[in-house]
Amino acid sequence: RETAQERIENWRKNNGILQIKTFSIERGDVNVMMSGTAALDQVKRPQFHFDLKIKGLEQIMRATGQKPELLGLLGGKRAAQGEMAFSLRGKDGQIFLGPLMLGKIPPLY
């Protein structure tokens, strides 16, 4: 019987791609919508590209002590109904929100 790691490795070797057409989380006035794709690269690190639309991001930033004015630095674009649109990417072990590198991801196994 295959282990979970063996299944994931077989999926990766066969060019497996996870496609998320619509994912949404809503709590009060905050709503996060996401779509995109994810896979594993040759060294087993996640690689992905997600388009995010976040409504209520200013509220989240204020609640966590951040200045909403910093949103422009993230490359977010104003979308309909007070939403901000961002690109969340993972490539070569690095995670980016817009142009800002958030951190690094090691191989999963």
Image (spheres, grey):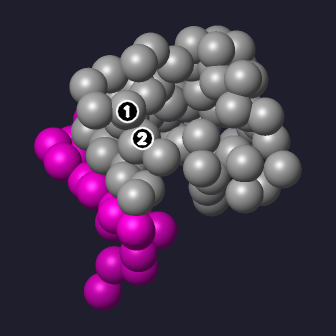
Task: Let me know if residue 4 is in the magenta part.
Answer: yes
Residue at 15 percent of width and 43 percent of height: 21
User: Given contact means CB atoms under 8 Å apart, are the residues at marks 1 and 2 in contact?
Assistant: yes
Residue at 70 percent of width and 14 percent of height: 73
In magenta, the rendered stretch is 1-28
Picture coordinates of residue 33, whole percent (x, y): 31, 46
Give the label on residue 83, or none: 1
Picture coordinates of residue 52, whole percent (x, y): 38, 35
Q: What's the amino acid at mark 1?
A: Glu
Question: Callout 2: 10 Å neighbours few (<14), some, many (20+)?
Answer: many
Q: Is residue 37 above or below residue 18?
A: above
Picture coordinates of residue 68, whole percent (x, y): 69, 32
Q: Is residue 76 above or below residue 95?
A: above
The quadrant in which residue 84 appears is top left
Q: Nearer the viewer, residue 34 or 11?
A: 34
- Farthest bottom residue in view: 1
Q: Is residue 62 above or below residue 4?
A: above
Distance between the alpha carbons at the discs numbered 1 and 2: 5 Å
Picture coordinates of residue 6, whole percent (x, y): 41, 66
- Farthest right residue in view: 65
The quadrant in which residue 61 appears is top right
Question: Callout 1: 10 Å neighbours few (<14), some, many (20+)?
Answer: many
Q: Quadrant of the N terminus?
A: bottom left
Q: What's the amino acid at mark 2?
A: Ile
Q: What residue would you read off at disc 2?
A: 54
Task: Let me know if residue 99 is in the magenta part.
Answer: no
